[in-house]
Image (cartoon, grey):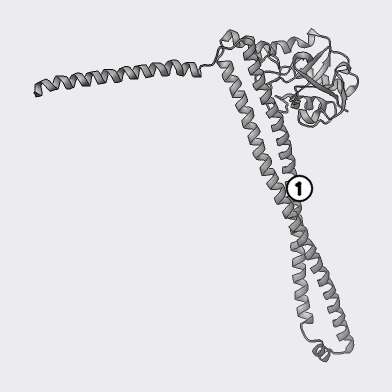
Amino acid sequence: MASHRRPKDRGRAGTTARTAAGLALAGAASVTVFGEAGHAEPRLTADEARARVDRLYEEAEQATERYNGAKEKADTATGRIERLQDELARRTERLNGTRDGLGSLATAQYRSGGIDPAVQLALASSPGDYLERAGMLDRMSSRQNAALRALSAQRRDIEQLRTETEGELAELRGTRAELARHKRTVEQRLASARQLLGRLTAGRRAEVLSSGGHGSADPARAGRAATGSRTGLAPAAAPNARAARAVSFAYDNLGLPYVWGATGPSAYDCSGFTQAAWRSGGVSLPRTTYTQINAGTRVSRSQLEPGDLVFFYSGISHVGLYVGNGMMIHAPRTGDVVKLAPVDQMPFAGATRPA
């Protein structure tokens, strides 16, 4: 009986194993087929890829401008805190001086006025000596009262300064957290754009980079364009000396790399570049696109003159410097360089003529 049962058990075990193996293979096949089908990126056309890449770069630039605003706010708060701390140190030093003066007054008063006035009169060699001592005590008492009032006022001022400093520090901590959040957003969007471009074939990637919304992101191509761009079109005459200097600065810096958050002199982001250009003309612009658009007189597209700031996208997330003939110079995006480009390359949002 046993000899007949063993083959039967082996057969059953073999069948079970084969069945399990078959199920495993089928399961693996289904996971492979459906998993790939579920997770594979659909093949994108060049236009679709370009639209996605441009959108990611636009979101990165929006976050960059928010980062720039938060950084400016943090820098300003840091400066205020340093001034408050310096003032707090000076007032604390004065407080200590007042306190030391009170100690000296108290010591002198004790030495000369610690005896009952009647006893002093008895011990005085003459009434005149007593009156002189009494007058001195009165003067010391008045000085002491004045010093006490000053000490009290100084303490109130110091407490107010400490409260103000603590409030500024709390605000700075919040601003730094905001700064870090915007930085993460920029880095995430740029990483997503790089990943998307990395999944494209070389030919399609070149096609996408050749005509994105912000212009070519191919540094070599952009560098060649920047090198020859000034001779391609004669610059239009600027309306005044300051605008002329801003335009000249823009041309002189063609080919420098875009780096988000950068304000020069070796790299720029878009608003850092326009800020630096107008600074060379003696005009101070705010740091971000959404504040620069209000720094001057708003002008229509038909009124543009060299030196005007031109803004793009509904969120006012990009800016360039108009140089005439329908062209601007701008710092486009990560991986690109400062370059000459048509104003109509991106969705126009407005223009400002700096004061």
Q: How many marks?
A: 1
For the N terminus, give its image quadrant: top left
- Where residue 297 sits, quadrant-wise, is top right
For the C terminus, give its image quadrant: top right
Residue 145 x %, y %: 82, 71
The residue sitting at the bottom extreme is 122
158 shown above or below 43: below
Dot 1 falls on a residue whose secondary structure is: helix
Residue 198 x %, y %: 56, 16
Query: Does 289 sit left or right of 244 as displayed?
Result: left
Disc 1 designates what residue?
83
Query: Does 293 sit left or right of 12 as displayed?
Result: right
247 shown above or below 132: above
Instruction: Return the residue nearer the eye: 173 or 27.
Output: 27
Residue 25 x %, y %: 34, 17
* Point 79% across, 87% down: residue: 116
Residue 167 x %, y %: 71, 49
Residue 183 seen in this snapshot: yes
Query: Does 2 sit left or right of 272 as displayed?
Result: left
- Circle 1 Cα neighbour tier, 10 Å, few/some/many (<14 / 14–19 / ≥20): few
Residue 261 seen in this snapshot: no
* Point 71% across, 25% down: residue: 269
- Where residue 12 sits, quadrant-wise, is top left
The residue sitting at the front extreme is 1
348 shown above or below 185: above
Amino acid on which disc 1 is placed: Arg
* Point 47% across, 16% down: residue: 36
* Point 69% across, 13% down: residue: 222
